[in-house]
Amino acid sequence: DYIVTEGGGYFLRTPGGNAIALGVGEKGLAFTRLTTKGVSGHGSMPYKADSAILKIARAVRGIEKLGDQVRFTHPYLSMIKGMNISSLLKYGLCHKWSLPGALKKLYALDPGLAKQFHAISRMTMSPNVIQAGQKINIIPDSGTIEVDIRILPGQTIEDVFSEVKRALGPSLADQFNIEIIDFFPSNVSSLDTPLKTATGEICGTVYPGVP
């Protein structure tokens, strides 16, 4: 009925003490390549050229500014509820308007925990590979961005395309070909199972009082 795999059984160092993490799901991936075309020219006379690099720069900036949308899943909220942190910080981490400030406060206490909560509260987009141009004096007429996108349970390929286009904005979305080059869906298991109950009881026996 069950399979036990990686992603759990480790301690979280929280401001209120240790907590034991039980992983019940994992984000999926959607590695995405964005390709754009332009008009080449000589670097000494850039007037009216259409540089692929400038388009890429605007696209990366758009992804940085708008490339993630907060979405609280049940496992995320359950994790916050069970942690040894202040009620005020819990509240901040569970509401979209207060999440940015709460993550900053948490980062000052535990950078690793803040990074984790940021990642599991949204689809993330990280533009990590850019390819454009061959010579310093030639304006490139094509280029690509490869983006590491991680999705939450319930999010689909269609959601990825929609979010990428939203990040690019209407002026750039039509200038890029969006191609998903690797995809693996997210998954999540129920918290209401005998295995979860037994695991909690065992952890409570070995580490009394640790949530």
Image: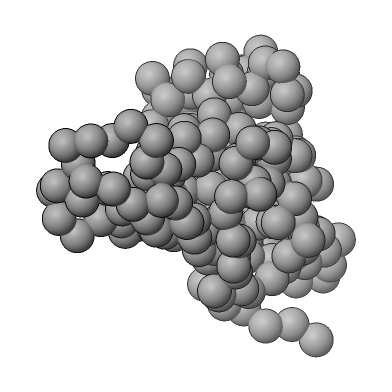
Which residue is at 14% across, 47% downward? 137
Q: Quadrant of residue 98?
A: top right
Count of numbered circles in the view: 0
Q: Residue at x 39, y 58 (%)?
A: 142
162 left or right of 137?
right
**Front in this rendered view, residue 47 or 55:** 47
Quadrant including the C terminus: top right
Q: Is residue 102 visible?
A: yes
- Please tell me which residue is depicted at 59% across the width and 61% down the height of the picture: 177
| Between 49 and 168, the one nearer to me in the picture | 49
User: Quick one: 177 or 96, which is closer to the camera?
Assistant: 177
Q: Is residue 178 left or right of residue 145?
A: right
Q: Is residue 22 above or below residue 2?
A: above
Up/down of 60 relative to 23, above or below: above
- Compared to 98, does 126 lie above or below? below
Residue 70 is left or right of residue 52, and the answer is right
- Give the position of the N terminus as an image quadrant: bottom right
Query: Which of 160/106 is in front?
Result: 160
Vertically, is 103 above or below 122?
above
- Residue 99: x and y in percent read 64, 22
Q: Position of residue 30 (x, y in %)?
A: 59, 65
Rendering quarter of residue 143 = bottom left
Could one spot residue 113 in this view of the protein? no
Q: In the orientation shown, which residue stands out farthest toward the right?
A: 192
Relative to 91, is 133 on the left or the right? left
